[in-house]
Amino acid sequence: MPTTQCDPARCVIAMAASVGGLKALSIILGDLPAGFPAAIAIVMHLSPDHKSLLAEILSSRTHLEVKQAQSGDMLCHSRVFVAPPNHHLLVVKGGRLQLSSSAAEKVHYARPSAEPLFASVAEEYKENAIAVVLTGGDGDGSFGVQIIKEKGGQVIAQDRPTSQDFSMPETAIKTGDVDFILPLNEIAPKLIALVSGLTDIKVPDKTCETNSQN
């Protein structure tokens, strides 16, 4: 997908997934329209021993531009940034991304982990931050969602019936800081609604977009 001019993001969505995450991310990103006025940063637990093709796979399943994150990348509307294996992904001042050292401490036995991403997005974007906790094992993201809420952001968790492994969403839900517990096919529409409210930009849903192309 060609690189377009960067429109700095006013709203950032941080997503975390593990077991079953490829399917979940593919469905959500596939249901978001081109021109979606938010940036998306993704952490998925990946093997550090192999090159990740996650960005390439997701790119083929969405209208949005997807790339593996690099230090210095600017968070832009309509772009998706995927954490590389063996590095935590953080957001720093000015809406830029930063990768940790490959020797950085693991969190929940994982590197990348949702916790540094959620916490840093919350600090930088406050009420314009949205966290999404998807299918996966362990409790990654449970501390980060609390920081998202403390800073005024909103939190979505995938529901049990559509999760391959409900451990991550369930642990987040038990914090009491999850605003919406949704089946997989309702997460993208909720993100569209939330982002429309935060940015005052009317986001067309995918159904309207598809009809306009027929």
Image: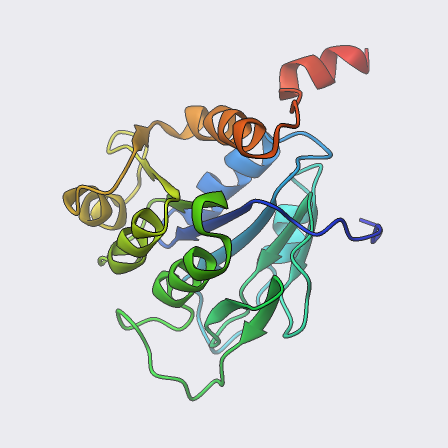
Is the image coloured rainbow, by chain, by secondary structure, or in one colour?
rainbow
Residue 149 vs residue 117, the one in the foreground: 149
Observer able to see residue 46: yes
Residue 22 vs residue 204, the one in the foreground: 204
Residue 123 percent location from the top left of the image = 43, 61
Task: Check the image and report above or below for 105 versus 127.
Answer: below
> Residue at the location (42% across, 69% down)?
112
From the viewer's perspective, tell me whether residue 115 is left or right of residue 58: left
From the viewer's perspective, tell me whether residue 120 is left or right of residue 168: right
Observer able to see residue 51: no
Quadrant housing the C terminus: top right
> Residue at the location (71% across, 36% down)?
63
Residue 65 percent location from the top left of the image = 72, 48
> Residue at the location (67% across, 73% down)?
72
Residue 50 percent location from the top left of the image = 53, 74
From the viewer's perspective, tell me whether residue 134 is left or right of residue 8: left
> Residue at the location (37% across, 55% down)?
18
